Image (cartoon, coloured by chain):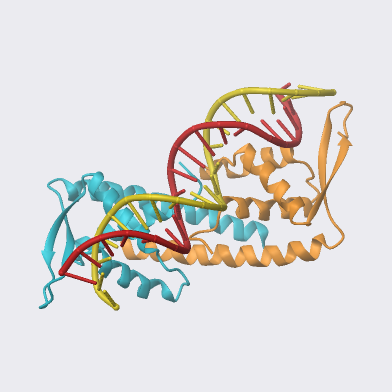
Chain colours: A orange, B cyan, C red, D yellow
Amino acid sequence: MGFLIAQRAYLKLYMITLVEKHRGYGYQMLEELKRDFKELGYEPPQSEIYRSLHDLVEDGILYRARHRKDDAEYQEVIMYYFTDHGMEKASLYRKQVIEDLERSQALIHKAIKDNSI
Amino acid sequence: MGFLIAQRAYLKLYMITLVEKHRGYGYQMLEELKRDFKELGYEPPQSEIYRSLHDLVEDGILYRARHRKDDAEYQEVIMYYFTDHGMEKASLYRKQVIEDLERSQALIHKAIKDNSI
DNA sequence: TTATGAACAGACTGTTCATCG
DNA sequence: CGATGAACAGTCTGTTCATAA
């Protein structure tokens, strides 16, 4: 266990939630998260989004499927779906990451308390 | 600016606060922080404590001074004190790190909110 | 431009090793 | 053991580059 939660785990959690909500492919998720985090001054890097998705495939939680985009364009897109036991695995992973988030929250809260004048 | 605050900055902030409180040398601070964080499941690594102190010296905030330990032992110890403009620099640094802590806090809070079932 | 991915370099960090009294 | 420090190895991450429709 490291210090605070890693960006990778943080984003993987979001990826799982987004796949649940059927926001299926990388670039879309990237744009959505960028918009979503703009006000907090955090811009998730493109590479981390893709790495997170690749990780989740390696973890056996998601699988990839090529699709043509819904609208009339020819562009192909990689959609992600839960594997057979993906949902269960994902819910375990989520639980674990939320715990890690709460641990991180406690550490940050303590530091603010201990070090404010 | 990275993602969440780095352990190094986090510990440097504690080092500054501990030097203010005249808890002067590395090993002591290490032991104090270990005790202090035990309940949160975080054990600051020895190397990071020393690296943080060395960083603060490089930053021109602290300086080192060898001392014999107060009690009757012969062991030498490195005490840290604020340099001439160390206090000002430290208060700037503190302000900056607290901001970063608050940014981190917001990111973590958002993730818990967005990804809880 | 949208979309995906990999390469690269550098920062960060945990463990281990070394040294000294 | 108390105390300090450095080396090493591995991970994490941001930027850049490559590719394609």
Res. B7 visible in picture:
yes
* In the image, residue D21 above or below residue D5: above
Q: Is residue B55 left or right of residue B99?
A: left
Q: Position of residue D8 (x, y in %)?
A: 45, 51
Tell me which corner region of the image, top left, top right, bottom left or bottom right, holds residue A44: top right
Question: Measuring 67% from the left and 52% from the top, which residue is drawn there?
Answer: A12
Q: Is residue A102 left or right of residue B79?
A: right
User: Quick one: quadrant of the N terminus of chain B?
Assistant: top left
Question: Measuring 51% from the left and 47% from the top, which residue is drawn there?
Answer: B3
Front in this rendered view, residue B10 or B117: B10
User: Quick one: quadrant of the C terminus of chain B?
Assistant: bottom right
Res. A116 visible in picture:
no
Q: Position of residue A34 (x, y in %)?
A: 62, 40
Tell me which corner region of the image, top left, top right, bottom left or bottom right, holds residue B32: bottom left
* In the image, residue B22 above or below residue A25: below
Front in this rendered view, residue B74 or D18: B74
Q: Position of residue B33 (x, y in %)?
A: 34, 69
Q: Is residue B62 left or right of residue B43?
A: left
Tell me which corner region of the image, top left, top right, bottom left or bottom right, holds residue B23: bottom left
Question: Measuring 74% from the left and 50% from the top, which residue is drawn there?
Answer: A18
